[in-house]
Amino acid sequence: MRKILVTGAAGFIGFHVSQRLLNRGNEVTGVDNLNDYYDVSLKRTRLNRLIASPLFFFHLLDLSDRKATEELFEKNAFDAVIHLAAQAGVRYSLTNPHAYIASNVTGFLHVLEGCKNKGVGHLVFASSSSVYGANTKIPFSVHDHTDHPISLYAATKKAGELMTHTYATIYSLPCTVLRFFTVYGPWGRPDMAYFKFTRAILEDREIEVYGEGKMKRDFTYIDDVVEVLERVVDHVPAPYKTWDSTYPDPATSFAPYRVYNLGNQNPVELLHFINIIENCLGKKARLKFLPPQPGDVWETWADTCELTQDFHFTPSTPLEDGLQRFVKWYIDYHRTSRNQS
């Protein structure tokens, strides 16, 4: 895979995977609309680091713009597409539903059409652990059905998975779905809990802790995610020869289509998570306990045995190490930003 399109390239995961691909010599075309869902200056700072490479080409583009997306594909021949662009956030979807349909459904349809029309060799689609919804059977397995989402964000990610399978079936477009489990690390999103907690502790502000801090998340470090993405993009799925239509397995297909969980396999209670951040900062948090919010899943836990089997890799960065690296980046980044201003 020589020439790769990364959508959402100025985002958290898109920035990191673009860097990895550039470092190994790929030509990367990045697309992003730089919306103001969170701090645009952080997106621009990430983007400036990528633009420094002569192998990186950026397009300021909203994928929900059909004409602009068609022109992008018409003027380029991509070997692979890593589709990370999406309207993120479970809670935001409760008050801004139209943004999720425009980006996660309509925008993704335009990408699928581009891949189909130009014969792209592999599409990697970023899904989410939120698709497991009301399922309480843990750990979550890719062989489980995901028919009961509890947020519109989750529903749009489920829709994206179904759309990829449709295009894999009708047009033989090879598609791989990766369900991300709470990705964290340096250059992360300010709307994520670990980012907000760190900022609040340093500013001596109260932290709102939902579900009395007993909810669990399978936190996955960004370097592990990027390592998997790098391996997956080069591994084009083939039809599963033993797929049985009388007992259809959601993880495989008669089409060139696969689904994998990408998590750390180690769910952690939110209170323990906060305690690790406190230790990294050397400062205690002020906590305000609140009931769970609508759309929140109580616990996430990834079964990644298929990922290990097919790619010989198991994400395993200890949470203590990952959060320590994030806190160091956070302090350095904001110190630099203050000095520049």
Image (cartoon, rainbow, N blue to C red):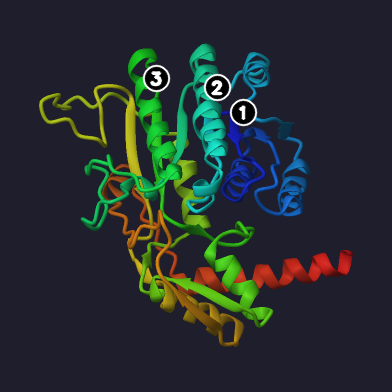
Give the left or right position of residue 254, taking residue 285 as reference.
left
Q: State the mark number for residue 105.
A: none
In this view, the mark in front (1 or 3): 1
Residue denoted by label 3: 167
Cα distance between the residues tagged 1 and 3? 18 Å
For label 3, the SS is: helix
Please tell me which residue is depicted at 51% across the width and 20% down the height of the picture.
115
Residue denoted by label 2: 110
Front residue of this view, candidates 19 and 36: 36
Q: Are marks 2 and 3 in contact (CB under 8 Å)?
A: no
* Quadrant assignment for the C terminus: bottom right
Choose the circle earlier in sequence order: 2 or 1. Answer: 1
In this view, the mark in front (2 or 3): 2
Q: Residue furthest front?
A: 95
Give the left or right position of residue 11, taking residue 289 as reference.
right
Give the left or right position of residue 158, taking residue 134 as reference.
right
The answer to whether residue 152 is above or below residue 214 is: above
Q: Are marks 2 and 1 in contact (CB under 8 Å)?
A: yes
Residue 328 x/y as whole percent: 65, 72
Residue 172 x/y as whole percent: 37, 16
Question: Looking at the picture, which amino acid does disc 2 mark?
Answer: His
Question: Looking at the picture, which amino acid does disc 3 mark?
Answer: Tyr
Residue 289 x/y as whole percent: 46, 77
Residue denoted by label 1: 63
Q: Is residue 85 visible?
A: no
Please rate how many residues cluster around mark 2, counting C-alpha atoms within 10 Å: few if below 14, some from 14 to 19, many from 20: many
Please tell me which residue is depicted at 55% across the width and 18% down the height of the picture.
114
For label 2, the SS is: helix
Question: Looking at the picture, which amino acid does disc 1 mark?
Answer: Leu
Front residue of this view, candidates 197 and 295: 295
Please tell me which residue is depicted at 70% across the width and 30% down the height of the picture.
61
